[in-house]
Amino acid sequence: MIDLKLLQKDFESIGKKLQRKGVDIAVLQSLKLKNEELKKAKADFETLQALQNSMSKEFGAYKREGKDISELKQRVDANKVLITQALDVQRVKQEELEKIAMGVANIPDDEVPDGKDEDDNVEIKKVLTPKEFTYAPKEHWELAQDNGWIDFEHGAKLSGSRFSVSYDMGAKLERALINFMLNFNGSRGFTEVSVPHMVNRTALEGTGQLPKFENDLYKIEGQEMYMIPTAEVPLTNLFQDEIVPYDLLPIKMTGYTSCYRKEAGAAGRDTRGMIRQHQFHKVELVCITKEEKSDTVFNEMIECASDILTALELPHRLVQLCAGDLGFGAAKTVDIEVWLPGQNQYREISSISNTRDFQARRAKIRYKDGKKNRFVNTLNGSSLAVGRTLVAIMENNQNEDGSIDIPEVLKPYLNMDV
């Protein structure tokens, strides 16, 4: 949730920043109005409470002095009714404010370039040079079928479209990639954490998936429980409504989970293959840190994810997202896109985002800086999407006969010499 005090203090400037991200100025004006109404409701309550305290003291004095208290008692009782009414008004105004505020995106950093969509994103650099093929490289679904690694037909038979079944080396490579990524992240100082794949509504509100993206989530019927869309949700919410000890920061975590998404907003996109599935494996990075260390940790996370791809000898590039392409909760994001020769283009394989204190305000994650409680900064990023990494290995390491070479760093995880 954005800082409402900051919006109230500098409405014009913050409004312009949010408009870069596509936020309607009318929504911000409504948010400002509701904030002013809440402030007035609180002030009205405090005035009545102060009057009640004053009359209570007067009531005690009257009794000690033996004065008639009947008229004063009537005023005290009447004021109690007004206090109850004022509390109800305050509660309603608070709910109205939060309902609007929970749907307002995070403020983009000043360094984020202007732009409407992915066409306006800015390439930072390329890492490794794509291989030149002397033949037309196949796409991953052809290679998967030829090698018997991935079965899309039986995945659809079991669960519907956008599901798959992995066999033999395909399944072993997924497991090898997960172990390799977790170990790599651990060597960079990220503590491995295993978390539930189902979370409550509060957790998803804390990281910003709810209420805005409810249609993309799988909900457990009859319960306020959801399948996680990413490990970011449970990892971040481990510290929900807590004051984290100062000495523990930064907290750097990595975790593997399956992820579950309806992909309601991606109808018709990447319907073939493993690029966009309803269930997929991902290794995630999450960091909880102080504001002054936020950018340092952000760069460490980008480097960690990029270095995994380099270790796998997969060409990729780093791209800074423009304001219009930023995610709902992100203040800034760098995407890592891996080269897919079968598609002859770079495709996203990781998205590293700094949410500043946006998620921390929603999830009430704080730390004590001296005597003052401050909101932490939270960061998250894929390191990496396992299925897309497997896709990249298949397409970049394919041979003319359809066989696929295994990256050297994965061979120890597969007990392979060749």
Image: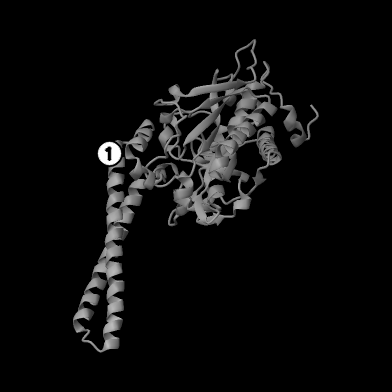
Where is 307 relative to 228, above or below? above
Point out residue 75 in the picture as x, y percentages from the top left corner: 21, 76
Name the residue rendered at 21%, 74% in the picture: 78
Q: List the single residue furthest toward the bottom.
A: 66
Q: Secondary structure at mark 1?
A: helix
**Residue identified by numbered label 1:** 26
Q: Is residue 183 left or right of residue 281?
A: right
**Which amino acid, by three-letter code, is at mark 1?**
Ala
What is the x, y in percent for residue 87? 30, 64
Instruction: Please rate how many residues cluster around mark 1, counting C-alpha atoms within 10 Å: few if below 14, some from 14 to 19, many from 20.
Output: few
- Say above or below: 195 vs 176: below
* Frontmost residue, 278 versus 7: 7
Name which quarter of the figure residue 259 lies in.
top right
Q: Residue furthest front?
A: 65
Residue 346, horizontal then vertical, whole percent: 55, 22
Which residue occupies the extreme right position in the image?
Answer: 417
Q: Nearer the viewer, residue 299 or 205?
A: 299
> Is residue 11 visible in the rendered structure shown here?
yes
Q: 331 or 343: nearer the eye?
A: 331
With 250 as the anchor, is 29 left or right in this view?
Answer: left
Q: Residue 84, image x and y in percent?
A: 28, 68
Q: Does residue 403 appear left or right of residue 16 in this picture?
A: right
Q: Is residue 219 visible?
A: no
Q: Residue at horizontal 49%, vertical 41%?
A: 356
